[in-house]
Every structure is written in C-alpha cells, then in structure tokens.
Image: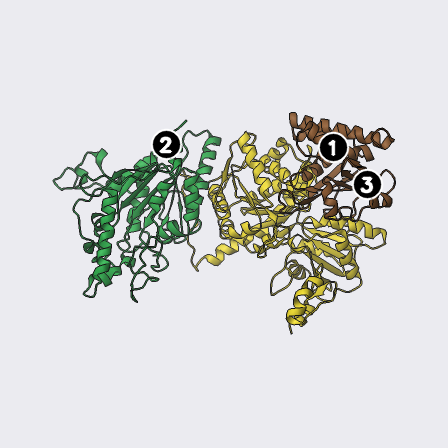
Chain colours: A yellow, B green, C brown
Amino acid sequence: MLNQIEGSLGVAKAVALCRPGVVCAYPISPQTHIVENVGKFVKEGTLKQCDFINVESEFSAMSVSIGSSAGGVRTYTATASQGLLFMAEGVYNASGLGLPIVMTVASRAIGSPINIWNDHTDSLSQRDSGWLQLFCESNQDAVDTHIMAFKIAEEVGLPVMVCMDGFVLTHAFERLDIPSQEEVDKFLPEYQPREFLDPKEPISMGAMVDPDAFTEVRFLQERKMVKALSVIERVTKEYRELTGHHSGGLLDCYNCDNATDLKLIIMGSTVGTAKDEIDRLKKEGINVGIISLKSFRPFPYEALKQAIGNTKQVICVERAFSFGARGIICPEVKRAMEGTNCEIHTALCGLGGRAIYGSTINGIVKQALAGKFTEEFTWFDINSNVLNSYLKDTEGVTFPQGPITDSQLQNSCK
Amino acid sequence: MLDQIKFYQTGSNTIGNRLLNPSMRAIQASADRPNGLISGHRACQGCGEALGARYAIDAAMRATGGKIVVANATGCLEVFSTPYPESAWQLPWIHSLFGNSAAVGSGIAAAMKVRAEKNGDAVAPRVIAQGGDGGTTDIGFGPLSGMFERNDDVLYLCYDNEAYMNTGVQRSSATPPSARTATTQLVGEHPGADWGKGKDVPMIAMAHGIPYVATATVADLRDLEEKVTKAMSFHGARYIQILTPCPLGWGCASGVTVTVARMAMETGFFPVYEAEYGKITSVRKIRQKQPVINYLKLQRRYAHLTGKKADPNVLARLQALCDTNIKNFGLLGDDEPQLTPAAIQAYERSNKV
Amino acid sequence: MLQVRLHGRGGQGVVTAAEMLSLAAFLEGHFAQAFPSFGSERTGAPVVAYARIDDKEIRTHEPILEPDVVLVQDRTLLSVIDVFSGISPNGYAIINSADPAEQVVPELCKKLPKGHVLTVPATQFAMEKLKKPLPGAPMLSSLAAATDVFKLESVQKSFQTRYPGKVGDANAETAALAYNYLKEVIKGGANA
C-alpha cells in the first residue's frame, strides 16, 4: 500500500509486519522515531504477542536483545552513533552467539566533538564485529531491507545491522510502498529457532572456549558470513519477485554499462542524489556509472569485481575514514581489483552531516575525469578557510582552497 | 540424573535430616535432587560459590518443576562450569557478558512470556540471572537497577565473595573495610581496603521497592533453599545476595568455608534477613554471638588484624560495625529491626488495582 | 520538479507544514518528499524545512539551495537570515504578514515576476479558527492559491488525516480562509 510517511514510520511498519516477539529501545537520535512507532503499535495492540521494553542504556538494549533472541523469539532493536559504541561489547557477543537479531543503525557521526548528523563512522567502527551490514539508499530500500534482513539473519544465523542514513532518510517524508501482512507472512514465516534456551531441551550457550578450539569456532563463524553472500542474493531475488520492488542485493549498478572511464562507489542516501547528477552529466555527454554498495559486510568482492569490470577509474565516495590510515571502503575495492589496472581513489566527504549535493558529485566526477585524483585519499569537501584560521597563527601553515590530498596533509606536518 | 541411591542411613539411628518427614527434608538430601549444576565442574576445593549456586538453583528448579532458564555473568561460576566443550549445567543456561546478566535475564523473561503466549502454554519458564559481587554491584549495576525498576520477572542471585576472584582477588564495591585484596594490599599506614567505601546492594534493591529481597549464606543452606523457594512464589524482580566465602581469596582453609560463613552471621558482620516490597519482614537471629575477631582470625586477608601488631583501633571499629548491624537489623533476642521507609514503587507493586 | 523551502521558528509547525505539503501532493498522485533541516533547534530558533514535488520518483536527498518557492512563516526572520537565498528568478515567495508585499520585501518584488511575491495574514487566520499561532495550513493553501500546484482540498485533507477531529477541521477552515483571501488578491479584488 502506498503511504506518504516518514522513513522512520515506514521502517517501524516494516518491522511490525515481521512480527517480532521482543523489541527493545533506548533513545538516541536519529533512530528514536522508529522505536517510538513500534512501541505505539505494541501498546495500541496492532502488533500482538510482542514485548516492548524501555531499558536504561544501549548496553542493556543489546543485552536484552541477546536474552530474548537466545530465548527463541524474533528480536529487533535500533540505535546510532554513541549508542552503538555503548553497546559494542554486546554487539560482538551477539554475533559470537549466532543470534539473528536485526538492528537498525540510523547512521550518525561519533563524538567528540558531539555531532548528531549523518555520516558512516558508527556502523563502520563495528566493521569487524561479525554482524552483516546492509546499507540502504532510500526509504523504500530501508523498508524492504528490514523485511529481508530478518530472513537473511535467521537463515544465516548471524545478526544484521540495517544502516540507513540518520535524518536524511529517517526524518524524510516520502512515498513508500509498504507490503501487506499477507505478503510478508508468505515471505517470512514464523520464526523457528534452531536452538534456544528451552527447559525441555537444555543447552549451554556462551561457554568459555580455550585455544584448542577458538580458531575453529571463529572459522565456522566466518563460514556463515561467506554463506551470507548467496543468501542475500537469493532472498533479494525472492523479495523482488514477490513485491516488484527493486531493493536490497549485494550491490546495485546504475548507468554502468557504458561507463568504462569512471564509476563511483557509494553507500547510502547519497546514491539517489548522485543518480540525478549523473543523469545531468549524461546530457553533457559524460558517462559515469554508480555502484551502490548495499552489503558492506559481508563484502561482495566477486560481485564488485564484475560490476567494475574494465572501468579505468573508480572513486569511492566515503563518509568515514580510519585515523592514521585512509579510507575504509577503498582498500576493500583494491582487494577486489587486485591484479587489474583499475585506479581506485577515495573522495572523503559528507562527514558529520555536511550535505553532499549534486554539485559535490559533479565536482568529484570532473576532478576524476581530469585525472586530478593523483593519490589514494583526498579530503574532498573540506573548507580551507576554517583550517587556515587556526593553523596560520599556531603553526604558520595554510592550505589552498579546494580538496586536500593525503600528501598535502603530510607535508604540512613536516 | 543420578541413579537412585539407597542411603543406608534411612531408617537407621544415624542423626541426619533423612530421618525427617520427607516434606521437611532439604532438596539436596533427596536422590531426586535436580542437579542443575552437576558435579565434575572445575571449582576450587571448598568453593562457596559452587555450594551456594548448587543449592539455590536446585531449589528454584524444584519450585518451578524444572522450568528454569539461567543467565550467568562472566566470573568464576561461568568459567568453572562451562569449559568448552563441557558443561555442568543440566538446564538451559547462557553466558553473555560480565556486566549484563540482569538485562539478558530480562530479555529471556520477555521471550519466555511471548513464547508461552504464542504456544498457548499456561505457565512460562522462569528466569534466574546470576553473577558474582563484581558482576552485580559494580559492572552490572546499571542493568541490575534497570531490571529492578522495570520489575521484570527475574530472580537475581548475587554470589558475594567480596572481591573479583576470577581475575585474581581485586577489590570490588562489596569488599569490606580493611580486607586485603590484590588492589588493597596490606601495606602503608592503612592496610587493606579503605573505610567508608562500598555499597549495600540488598538495601539498594529494597529501595527499588521490588517484591522480594533477601540475604543468605552458605552456612545455613536450608535457609537459602527456603528463600529461593519463597522468591519463586513472587513474580517481578527479586534479589538474593548469598555470602559465599572464597578460600583462595579470603585466605582460609578450604575445609572451613561453611564455618567462616557461619561466623560472618554470628558476629553480625553479614546480616541475614528478608524484605518484601521494601520492608524487612524477617531477620535471622544470631544464635551464639561471637566477637568479630573469631571471624577475622579464620582468614589471612585480615592477617594484619589478628597478629601481635594488630591495630586495636581498627579491630574496635570492625566490632562496632558488627554491633551496628546487630542493632539496625535487630539480630539479637527479641530486638526488632529498625524500620526503613519503602520506595513508593513498593506501594504500586504490592497493591494490585 | 518543484522545490519548496519553508522558513519559520521552532514551535510554529514548519516541519509539519513541509510534511503536509508533501502529503497534499501525494494525495493528488504526485511524488513528493519533505525533510527538515536536521538540527537540535529549540523553540523560537530559526528552522528550515524542505519539500519537493515531481511526477517521477524523487531520488535526490540534498538540501534545497535553489528553491522554486520560499514560504516564510515568520516575518521577523527577514532581518535575521537571507531566506530568499538562491530563489529561482521565476520563483514564488509567500510571506506570513498582513502588510502588502511591496512594503514587506520591496527588493524581492522587483526581482521576481509580478504576482510572485505575496503576503497573507496566516497567523491572523490561524488565531481566528485554530486559536493558536500555527500558520502551516494557511501558508500551504496560499501556495495552492498562488501556483495551483495542488488543490485547497488536498491541503485540508492532509491536515485532517494527520489530525483527525477538531484540530484537523480547524486547520482546514484556516486553510480555506487564506486560500480565498489570496485568490481575491490575485484577481486584484478587495484584498489587493
């Protein structure tokens, strides 16, 4: 059914359609509207046989989720930013226990300095936590990905983070096609846990594993992650056939067929903005492809290699980076393209809610096609005036206007 | 389950509780005891925690017909009971993290309720969350308080051995003053743990106004069984703090675990009582009052107070601490405990509309 | 695509107005999008919200720098921020004020085509029917009157959907007052 609603309400409706048994919540912007709505569905009785629990911290939100998922019911929670870090210990624990929890991360920067706006630092900080991370490019994608996420999580036996850009998507009112309960019931049958805490068949979960077996336990966990690649593809296909929606997948290509000079790899809501700009550029005779990276974990090396094909240059539009290193997506793409001549760079932009405009994308494309991405890593949308106003007086350092490369930064420290 | 064992004492003149009417016998006295935590685990000789857990869990299993799920904090109990691929637990059991067993318990309780509703079961399995004093009074205190204030249907068992034993006897907020730990060494002007620090979690639990709070020790195991059984007759958040001496950490012989625990009661050092909805309802009276020195001298963690160089002022202060407990909780004779006002939530919970 | 930027102050229902704008367009079968300028603004602080209307899927999520329409819910903002920044040369501006546009924003009147800069006493209408200074509904119906981008009825229905009962109905009545007022102005009638 078509609705004109806030993204958060759309996600709440999608979650409710999946009939979770326990939903746990602790307030943090910008995910609050999602759990507020789910809580309302429970309280007004539209979401039945579901316990909605207001807890005292994100650490407990994840811990209650661990308990309820281990107790054999479908479990959902949501968080962002500082909240994700506050629950980090439980995040790793949930994947180690193999619990198919689904959690929305309304992606937001991490402080200090405190910043409530969107970038991808939060979920990417949990890159190695053993959770699947699925990114959404629109609210429709978010609605659909949440429904798919429960199926993927339960088939694979691992928890899934559904990452949707905070505010930009969570707070946007858009047209959403919400599947019917019948459709979702058909797609996602009632949760049948393979193992859970049951007095009829007692099991011990979370035993201490010593060096004799720890590596093997990790190997088995990684196997699940690898299996997830094909599960994501199969579940996506099934969902698309059922709903006709073009959501989910490991990645999604736009205008890629003829764009052999340049492709952009983007995660999240920037994809839509970039698509519009790419259409405008096409009218100028410039052909650029967009690869919307949907599954960050597991990372789809093979699918990405195929999607990039013989493209000469790839720019990763990244909204987070690794201190003391460089981009986070770029090294993965390099691994995928090892042995080819493809040039791969990072354009870092959109940190802490700095808007990525069509003009930002235009600038990246023009700079790339002019061969001006000479280094792996560039601070693309940085404002030198702000830097200079501080560095000129303190260290006698100034930067020219425009993007700043990694070596410019390094030289300024000498 | 163990095979049926014929006890030769039964019906003989041997003095023991097997001569009692079966309904009055301890749960552990029966060959049909549930053995939730079965033998073969790797606890130290004389482990108070293993003893306390065994009695408490079996009492809960008996009270619920075996429908119990346990969430365990990281700590000795978790480590010695589940070295992969072995487990000493004959019930559904989960270990998640150090500081979250109360919250995991809340999640399990919610899951059990929802599953029972979906399956049309009249009774949902009950939940125990448990941990040591570090996992309870320190790192797990936030989730514990959250579980209390939501009045989640979880019985929390704190096995209190007054320090972080699993990591090598470091001080916790349950470590008593002057006691030696690895982080409150017997050096300097004021050896041992500082005075005036720490927290009384049973009293804090009472301040939440939850249905049932109790303290117990492994010296009075029938009392512990009865308290657990009683706790399972309530729904909502419940808390029992069990004093479980640690021979290694306390520096006592592994054969005197029960004696030390008894001495903690009989000196008034560890008051044993029950409270419902924030008010004390019963007190375990001291049977034969002992001076605090008799408690201290069993433990090398108080070695600085029992030798020739002992500071009489500190000893007097510890005796005064015991006397204050005796007075406050009315531990002697017909004394009444001093009343503490209950949290308003206790009124909400005890008065059903 | 029609791009609308709404300016107001925290507590005046600016974000809601943008959402209702998108809902009105949706009710007429358009694709629409609304989103706030995400911040932690408190009551009384300047607030910006955005809306887009199109006949195909709206993919972009960038803030609107070059609006086709600017709605100013609070006249006092005119001296504080450049609310008309980037406005399209053929754009529309509607300001909540009882004074004539030529008096309120003379410069803008010279810049934009005749009849594209309008004022409407939205707060006054809101106080009449709603008894609260929430000018969202009359501002949207003014947009409908000025551009015919959607009907008055769609504005009314959007508020009645969001606030079923008295509040929605009062908003609908307020919207009608402003709509009729502005249609008269545009015709060069009594209110001109």
Q: Is residue B118 above or below residue A116?
A: above
The Cα–Cα distance between marks 3 and 1, rounded to whole angstroms, is 21 Å
- Measured in 3D between alpha carbons, the distance from the residue under mark 1 to the one under mark 2, in whole angstroms, is 53 Å
Chain hosting mark 1? C
Label 3 Cα crowd, 10 Å radius (few <14 / some 14-19 / many 20+):
few
Q: Is residue B94 visible?
A: no
Q: Chain of mark 2?
A: B
Residue C90: horizontal and vertical position, in percent?
85, 43
Judge depth for marks 3 and 1 and give the one in front.
Answer: 3
Residue corresponding to mark 2: B350
Residue B43 rendering spot, x and y as whole percentages = 31, 54
Residue type, label 1: Pro
Q: Give yes or no for contact between labels 3 and 2 (Cβ–Cβ under 8 Å).
A: no
Disc tally is: 3
The relative height of residue A86 versus residue C190 in the rendered view (above or below) is below
Residue type at mark 3?
Gln
Secondary structure beneath disc 3?
helix
* Mark pair 3, 2: CA separation: 68 Å
Provide the secondary structure element on which disc 1 rests. Answer: helix
Residue extending furthest toward the left: B13
Give amino acid for label 2. Answer: Ser
Q: Which mark is residue C103?
A: 3
Which of C134/A153 is in front?
C134
Depicted A398 relative to depicted B3: above or below: below
Which label sits in the foreground, 1 or 2?
A: 1
Q: Which mark is residue C138?
A: 1
Q: Position of residue A5 (x, y in %)?
A: 67, 36
Whichever of callouts 3 and 1 sits on the residue coming sooner in the sequence is 3
Q: Are marks 3 and 1 on the same chain?
A: yes
Quadrant occupied by the C terminus of chain A: bottom right
Q: Examine the rendering and report whether any part of residue A55 can be seen.
A: yes
Instruction: Tell me the chain of label 3.
Output: C
